[in-house]
């Protein structure tokens, strides 16, 4: 991805979150110099990969297959006491986050406002294939059963609980607008706990065609 494209996505995301009155912590807007000045005290942010995260999953087409995320809080396995994580995401209409599941993470995905979020579901087999068995889950604490490959549509305020081993892909419903999506989960590890059904690139290679607006989580090692 080009840095100019990432900067535009960041600006658009900031405007959408402001519209929905979702406020990020002050460090989200630090300059590179402020990061370097506060690096020692902010080491948890860097080590636990908190912050801005934009990926096109290696597709080369962010608005077709991609995702904007900001990790607000997160622990680290066998390192600190924090056992939970929280993210905010923005999902465009028909913008796919590809089919995947987690070995360790259990998560609630919440529609925080905007359009509707469509989630397609399968159980995973022992060899990481798509099972044909029904998927048992809960939405807002209520038991539901969905056929293999079935869809759950979350309207604003609704949520779904996804246990380990449940394949899911999601996108914004056509004609409903972009979606502000929350995620509350156990500790998140995007380097080793994502099992994608098809091979994808989780962190995009960035072409530096203009100065950055904000450091991404994938920029920390490069600039700090």
Image: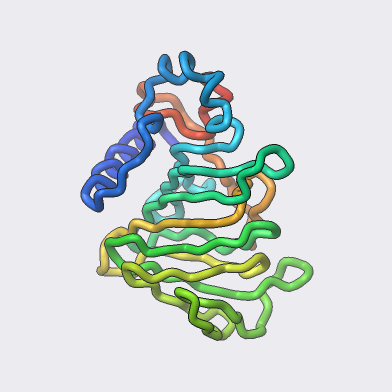
Query: Which residue is situated farthest in the right direction here?
Result: 126
Q: Nearer the viewer, residue 90 or 144?
A: 144
Query: Which residue is situated farthest in the front direction here?
Result: 81
Q: Nearer the viewer, residue 51 or 1?
A: 51
Q: Quadrant of the N terminus?
A: top left
Q: How many marks?
A: 0
Q: Residue at x 64, y 54 (%)?
A: 194
Q: Nearer the viewer, residue 140 or 164?
A: 140
Which quadrant of the figure has residue 3?
A: top left
Q: Position of residue 32 (x, y in %)?
A: 42, 19
Q: Is residue 156 depicted above or below 187 in this figure? A: below
Q: Is residue 127 depicted above or below 212 in this figure? A: below
Q: Position of residue 34 (x, y in %)?
A: 41, 17
Q: Position of residue 133 (x, y in %)?
A: 66, 84
Query: Which residue is situated farthest in the left direction here?
Result: 19
- Rendering colour mode: rainbow
Q: Is residue 161 depicted above or below 151 in this figure? A: above
Q: Residue at x 26, y 68 (%)?
A: 176
Q: Residue at x 50, y 43 (%)?
A: 73
60 relative position to 104: left or right: left
Q: Position of residue 89 (x, y in %)?
A: 41, 52
Q: Residue at x 53, y 22 (%)?
A: 41
78 relative position to 39: left or right: right
Is residue 196 visible in the rendered structure shown here? no
Is residue 129 visible in the rendered structure shown here? yes
């Amino acid at each position: 991805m080009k840095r100019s494209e990432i900067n535009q996505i960041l600006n658009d995301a900031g405007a959408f979150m402001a519209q929905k009155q979702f406020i990020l912590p002050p460090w989200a807007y630090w300059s590179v110099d402020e990061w370097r000045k506060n690096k020692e005290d902010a080491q948890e942010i860097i080590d636990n990969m908190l912050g801005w995260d934009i990926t096109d999953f290696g597709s080369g087409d962010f608005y077709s297959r991609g995702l904007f995320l900001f990790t607000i809080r997160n622990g680290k396995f066998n390192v600190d006491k924090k056992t939970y994580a929280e993210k905010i995401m923005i999902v465009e209409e028909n913008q796919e986050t590809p089919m995947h599941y987690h070995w360790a993470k259990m998560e609630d995905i919440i529609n925080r406002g905007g359009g509707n979020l469509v989630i397609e579901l399968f159980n995973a087999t022992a060899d990481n294939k798509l099972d044909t068995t029904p998927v048992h889950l809960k939405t807002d604490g209520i038991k539901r059963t969905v056929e293999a490959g079935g869809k759950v549509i979350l309207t604003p305020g609704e949520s779904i609980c996804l246990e380990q081993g449940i394949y899911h892909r999601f996108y914004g419903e056509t004609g409903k607008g972009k979606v502000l999506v929350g995620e509350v989960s156990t500790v998140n590890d995007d380097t080793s706990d994502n099992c994608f059904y098809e091979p994808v690139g989780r962190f995009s290679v960035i072409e530096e065609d203009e100065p950055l607006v904000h450091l991404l989580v994938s920029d920390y090692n490069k600039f700090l």
